[in-house]
């Protein structure tokens, strides 16, 4: 298969108590696994597309045949989003950002606390399933955006520096309908080292490699 489910870079229980092991297992194995399976199925009758990365597919959805465009948008987005998501978290993560990402946040939002507030508010206000992102713009600036379903900022010509998953399957077993509580707790597992690598990729306009 052209696209594969990447392994988690840590154990299912490694992000406890912020994200419970049962949620991680369901989220990674079942939900992300289904996106990969469905993406490969959608590409079966188009061998010329099978060598393309998921990022390249969703970057120019108009180039994807109409009969599979919706499936590629949803499942290709799911592959890109989740492959990033597992990496931008780590055990004993969190704390204040450091390095270049700290400078970007301070320059754009004033301070980290104000940025967190705006980011969390955007996540709370995303109606239904979706994601909240810090995304880079072509001119080099950054902005907070939210996207529905598995849409990724790549499809809007933006660079996804990092994002948080606000689908219910990402938090409901532990937090039930308390999305704001999940969003606030999530900062305790953020991997700022990985985010700085993604920021560096944005600043040099190189896509971070997606696990294939």
Image (spheres, rainbow, N blue to C red):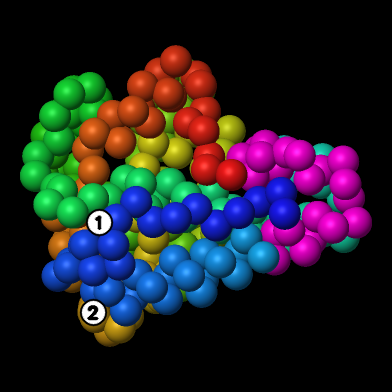
Q: Give the residue at x 88% y 46%.
A: 47
Quarter of the image for the N terminus: give it. Answer: bottom right
Residue drawn 60% across the image and 69% down it:
34
Residue 206 screen position, x and y as percent: 51, 21
The residue pinned by badge 1 equals 120
Helix, strand or loop for disc 1: helix
Q: Quadrant of residue 41?
A: bottom right
Residue stretch rendered in magenta on the structure:
38-59
Q: Residues within 10 Å of mark 2 (few under 14, many from 20)?
A: some
Q: CA distance from mark 1 to mark 2?
A: 15 Å
5 or 58: which is nearer to us?
A: 5
Instruction: Name the residue at the top extreme.
Output: 204
Please identify the dominant SS of the magenta region.
helix
Front-most of residues 42 and 148: 42
Residue with the most extreme right position:
45
- Residue beneath label 2, please? 175
Q: Is any atom of residue 121 visible in this view?
A: no
Residue sitting at x 73%, y 58%: 40
In this view, 37 is above or below 153? below
């Amino acid at each position: 298969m052209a696209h594969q489910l990447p392994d988690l870079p840590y154990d299912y229980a490694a992000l406890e108590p912020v994200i419970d092991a049962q949620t991680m297992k369901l989220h990674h194995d079942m939900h992300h696994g289904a996106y990969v399976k469905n993406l490969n199925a959608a590409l079966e009758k188009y061998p010329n597309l099978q060598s393309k990365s998921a990022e390249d597919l969703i970057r120019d959805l108009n180039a994807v045949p109409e009969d599979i465009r919706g499936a590629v948008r949803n499942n290709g987005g799911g592959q890109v989003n989740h492959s990033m998501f597992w990496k931008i978290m780590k055990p004993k993560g969190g704390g204040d950002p450091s390095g270049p990402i700290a400078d970007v946040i301070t320059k754009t939002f004033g301070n980290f606390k104000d940025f967190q507030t705006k980011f969390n508010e955007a996540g709370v206000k995303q109606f239904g399933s979706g994601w909240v992102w810090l995304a880079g713009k072509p001119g080099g600036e950054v902005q907070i955006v939210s996207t529905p379903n598995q849409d990724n900022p790549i499809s809007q010509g933006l660079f996804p520096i990092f994002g948080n998953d606000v689908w219910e399957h990402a938090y409901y077993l532990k937090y039930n309908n308390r999305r704001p509580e999940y969003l606030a707790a999530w900062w305790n597992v953020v991997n700022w080292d990985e985010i700085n690598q993604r920021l560096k990729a944005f600043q040099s306009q190189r896509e971070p490699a997606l696990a294939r």
